[in-house]
Amino acid sequence: MAASFHVRSNSFPSRTHPQAAHVDEQLARLRSSEEASTSSTYSICKRIDNLQELHESLGKLICLPVTQQALAQGQNKKAVEQLLDGSLRILDLCNISKEALSHMKEGLMEIQSILRRKRGDLSGEVKKYLASRKSLKKTFQKVQKPLKSAQDVESLAVFGQAEVVTIALFDALFSYMSGSKTCGKWSLVSKLMSHKRVSCEAQANEFTRVDSEFQSEKAMKIEDVQILVSCIQDLEDGVESLSKSLIKYRVSILNTLGH
């Protein structure tokens, strides 16, 4: 979903405007972190936090009179509609992420309880968890497929770019949770923005480590389960906060159109 700008350059606040300049800096930081860092719970949570701050800044940018005037222009109607549609798609990705994380955490906490008490149907719960993981991986692959299709869409400057980096975050999150191949130096953002080839490599993390232990049924460590539950909680909290910021951002656009 590449951003292409079909609005007059004087329609939006100049990049010398403090708020516009701040948004540009946040976008640059997000692109840099997406391309430079290997995936980890910490790096993904940091990107989620940065995206939350970005959308809060975009909300302030929308409130500027010059931005409101630009959004109200007839020539930008289609682009604004696409932004609203895009915000709904991203909120759907938030919901899919939250449901998946919650489902995995519930299963892991049951297994954790059995390991602590040393009684209960451990084998049965592990099989249920692994079956659930297999189903979730299929869901992630289905959701990710359209995210990787680079398409030129009419958009509105930094608002379109924000949509691109947000979609890239969820693509990385789904890859991280499933342990599938993840993009390396050439990021999804680069692919969406410039159609460059993306090289990928498999990743091992807290999710795949616990999967391996459960599948082997030999060295099942409660410590690793606890670490994964903690990671899931951090990701859950981050996605929930981002979701709230996205809702406020969408409402800001709708309120501007209603003026």
Image (cartoon, rainbow, N blue to C red):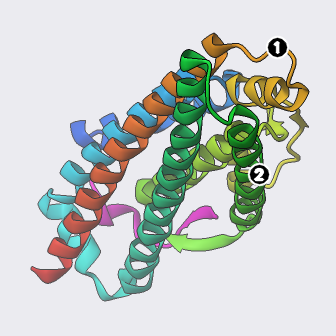
Q: Left or right of 8: which side holds 56?
A: left
Q: Left or right of 114: which side holds 127?
A: right
| Residue at 67% from the left image edge and 71% from the top image edge | 152
Indicate whether 52 appears above or below 63.
above
- Depth check, front residue: 196 or 103: 103
- Bounds of the magenta segment: 1-15
The amino acid beneath tag 1 is: Ala
Task: Tell me the CA gap for discs 2 and 1.
Answer: 19 Å
The reply to whether discs 2 and 1 touch (Cβ–Cβ < 8 Å) is no
Locate residue 249, reporting x and y percent: 27, 58
Occupied quadrant, residue 56: top left
| Residue at 50% from the left image edge and 69% from the top image edge | 89
For the N terminus, give its image quadrant: bottom right
Is 59 in the magenta? no
For the C terminus, give its image quadrant: bottom left
Locate residue 167, reporting x and y percent: 57, 54
The amino acid beneath tag 2 is: Ala
Which mark is on residue 168? none
Q: Secondary structure at mark 2?
A: helix
Q: Is residue 24 visible?
A: no
Occupied quadrant, residue 129: top right
Is 13 in the magenta? yes
- Depth check, front residue: 177 or 54: 177
Q: Which residue in the structure is indicated by mark 1?
A: 219
Q: Which residue in the structure is indicated by mark 2?
A: 131
Q: Which of pointers 2 and 1 lies earlier in the amino acid sequence?
A: 2
Indicate whether 46 appears above or below 149.
above
| Residue at 67% from the left image edge and 36% from the top image edge | 121
Q: Is residue 82 visible?
A: yes
Q: Left or right of 219: which side holds 249?
A: left
Q: Residues within 10 Å of mark 2 (few under 14, many from 20)?
A: few
